[in-house]
Amino acid sequence: MTEENLNEEGCPELPVGVEKSLCDCGGIEGLKECLPAETDIEAICNIHRVLADQNRMKILAMLNVQPLCVCVIKVIMDIADSKLSYHLSVLKKAGFVTGEQQGNWIVYNLTEKGREWFLSGNL
């Protein structure tokens, strides 16, 4: 930033619309107060990390159609058991899927949270 962009107080010049809206919300301190809590931002970032993986999004897409057992998910995904297990555990820990024991199988379903986040991706 060059000195010609600073006002007489040594502060940067702001576009008129930004300066007005910043003043309307209480200045820098007012803007800080409008921000979500750090724990909320961290939680949102964690959710986005979960959703940023293509394998997990494919699993969510399949479960959005219908509940499935691991054997069907594995055939469609064509990945190793350990990798599938890892992705399912990440989705479970995030609260996006549940697994219900049905005889010898575990059937996975989207939770309401999983459905909401999956659908918010406009897929």
Image: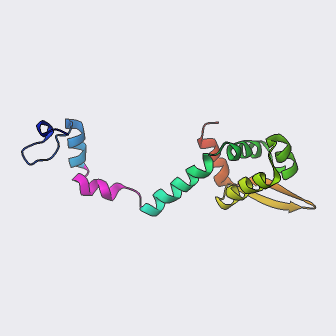
- Residue at 80% x, 45% y is 79
Q: In the current view of this chain or complex, which residue is farthest to the left? A: 8
Q: Quadrant of the N terminus?
A: top left
x, y (%) of residue 21?
25, 43
Relative to the observer, which residue lies in front, 41 or 12? 12
* Quarter of the view holding residue 13: top left
Q: What stretch of residues is rendered in magenta?
A: 25-37
Please tell me how many numbered marks the rendered image carries: 0
Relative to the observer, which residue lies in front, 62 or 56? 56
Q: Is residue 73 left or right of residue 12?
A: right
Relative to the observer, which residue lies in front, 81 or 28? 81
Q: Is residue 112 left or right of residue 24?
A: right
Magenta stretch holds residue 22: no
Please tell me whether the stretch drawn in magenta is mainly helix, strand or loop.
helix
Q: Quadrant of the C terminus?
A: top right
x, y (%) of residue 106?
85, 58
x, y (%) of residue 20?
20, 42
- Residue at 52% x, 54% y is 44
Q: Is residue 41 left or right of residue 82?
A: left
